[in-house]
Amino acid sequence: MSRPWWHTTSIYQVYPRSFADSNGDGIGDLPGIVGHLDHLVDLGVGAIWVSPFFASPQRDIGYDISDYRSVAPEYGTLDDARTLIDEAHRRGLRVLFDLVLNHTSDQHAWFRESRSSRTNPKADWYVWHDGRVGSGGRRLPPNNWRSELQLTKAWQWSDEREQWYLATFLPFQPDLNWRHPDVRSEMFDTVRSWLAMGVDGFRLDIFGSIMQDDQLRDNPRRLDLSFGLPRVQQPTNTLNTDDNFTLAGDLRAVCDEFTPPPGTPEIPGAGERILLGEVFGPAETLRRYVRDGERDGLHLVFLFDFLTATYSAAGYRRLIERFEVEFPDPLQPTYVLENHDRTRSLSRVGGDLAKARVLATMLCTLRGVPVVYQGQEIGMTNRYIPLREADDPIPGLLARRLPEAVNRRLPERLNRDEVRTPMQWTAAPGVGFCPDDVAPWLPVNDNRSERNVADQSGDPSSLLSLYRTLLALRAASPALSGSSLHIVDSDAEEVLAYERSDGEERLLVVANLGARRAEHAITGGADIVVATDPSITVRVAGGGRSTVRLAANSAVVLRPA
Ligand code: NOJ
Ligand code: CA
């Protein structure tokens, strides 16, 4: 059965500022991405998601947009964006842009105008409210809402208007007022303009935070540790409100305007345009973003559970089983091990490359859409940078409160610069990201000599070669792009095994996540298709059975005979 392209694709996240610098200013740019598209073709991914490159003061590295319809000059021009789409399509790659719908930069002309008075034409384009008066005439915000990061209030005071504006994320990122018809039509038209340029879809930034309770009811004051961040209040009236599900359906309708009629060949640039949501919450909430009653919404949502899961067979099995129940076909789960906000996955497993190879094998063989963050394919790790030296704005909110000695030992990196260092193309001092005599915007990682694309390309035993093999297998295998995944029990506690199949083909994945060798019994024989360790064997054990012998932290894809 032919499946929509986005059921079987794999997505590679490009963080433009750190990917490749084409003009030697130490800042990655759009021509730099175009110049390295062949790496992504060789890697075998199906689509790229490009983090924001629109005009921006870059206080949150592009997630603070000052003009949605133009490109930040240090990244290039609109023509470069067009070239990126065309050159990607020419190579069979789809392209997703990043849509930051919730907020703009406080330097956006709309906000500057909106802030200037209570009566200007854009006065209601943002969420403005009068505050309350506390004891002794103290100025208080309209209600108790905290920002998404919980570190500040969600309201910021403006002397000019003598009112509060809502800033769900950081104070310089004012929330747009999506209840205003002109905001909706302007933003939807912007989306249309990128779709008309040929983009295949969008990753949606903090989509669940776009619309809050219109009666401004307080959030219940209760510690909430359930999803995403630890919160000092339950986000009942600020996150995942009903209006956000409606918006998902409305945005889907805009994308569908550009989806070709049934029967149109599935070629890049001509297929269904898709929405991939950054949303947080329990499964029923995430599913409601995909389908709300009778209405289709987002095509895919990120499932972030693997970002924090402990490396273990039992823990991963529980997650996979949950994803299978919560996102049964035709819904597609997504698998994410790292991104530009979170700890590098190799650092999370203590820098153990064998574990990274097991994770790569799982990522590329599970049912659903794998998302690979730039550098993950060569085993890039966090590069420690103290809070006080950060470019990232979040550490600025923390630096005074958190001693560096404590920060240094935290498993989750609070300074996101640490996971955004330049992509390591070569072992040269500038790692092939920028000229060697230029200082890149963030320092390069010390491990550049063993972790770089050039050296790993020629080494069949490298992590990069493994990713290439696995992604090529995934693209060619009916079983791996099929709709069935069946977990197989194992006598070995640290072994996780599952079968992928469709009518034509059956594959078995066996992973040993333990620190000791393990054996897994199978019926019949099997051929090794991909192994993360050369010592893995399949031996006939008699009685119509065989034994798969796995080294510590190793995995294998088998084709049962
Ligand atoms: C989520 C993005 O991934 C992050 O990098 C950004 O800072 C916030 N949204 C705000 O846009
Ligand atoms: Ca540059």
Image (cartoon, grey):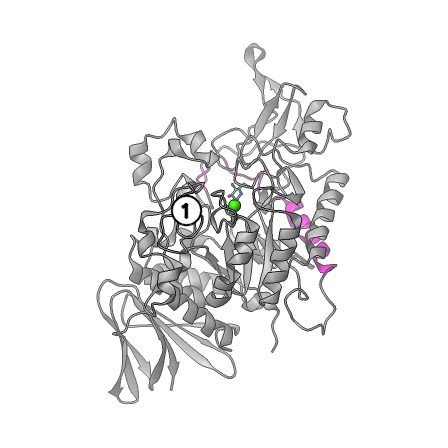
Horizontally, residue 344 falls left or right of residue 125, namely left
Q: Nearer the viewer, residue 505 or 260?
A: 260
Residue pictured at 55% horizontal, 28% vertical? 144
Q: Nearer the viewer, residue 219 or 49?
A: 49
Q: Nearer the viewer, residue 236 or 340?
A: 340
User: Residue 485 in the image: x percent, y percent?
Assistant: 46, 72
The residue that disc 1 covers is 419
Instruction: Say which amino acid is labelled 1.
Output: Val
Horizontally, residue 93 falls left or right of residue 518, namely right
User: Residue 308 in the image: x percent, y percent?
Assistant: 39, 51
Specify whether residue 251 is painted magenta.
Answer: yes
Q: Is residue 264 visible?
A: yes
Q: Over which residues does the magenta segment extend?
A: 229-258
Image quadrant containing the N terminus: bottom right
The image shows residue 73, relative to residue 546, as above or below, that is above
Q: Nearer the viewer, residue 432 or 508?
A: 432
> Which residue is situated farthest in the bottom direction here?
543
The 10 Å Cα crowd at callout 1, few under 14, some 14 to 19, many 20 or more, is: many
Horizontally, residue 339 falls left or right of residue 550, namely right
Specify whether residue 180 is painted magenta.
Answer: no
Answer with the quarter of the image where residue 560 lies: bottom left
Residue pictured at 56% horizontal, 52% vertical? 31
Q: Is residue 365 visible?
A: no
> Which residue is situated farthest in the front direction here?
437
Image quadrant containing the C terminus: bottom left
The image shows residue 372, relative to residue 99, as above or below, that is below
Residue pictured at 60% horizontal, 22% vertical? 157
Q: Mark 1: which secondary structure?
A: helix
User: Residue 230 in the image: x percent, y percent?
Assistant: 43, 39
Residue pictured at 50% horizontal, 72% vertical? 475
Answer with the quarter of the image where residue 321 lies: bottom left
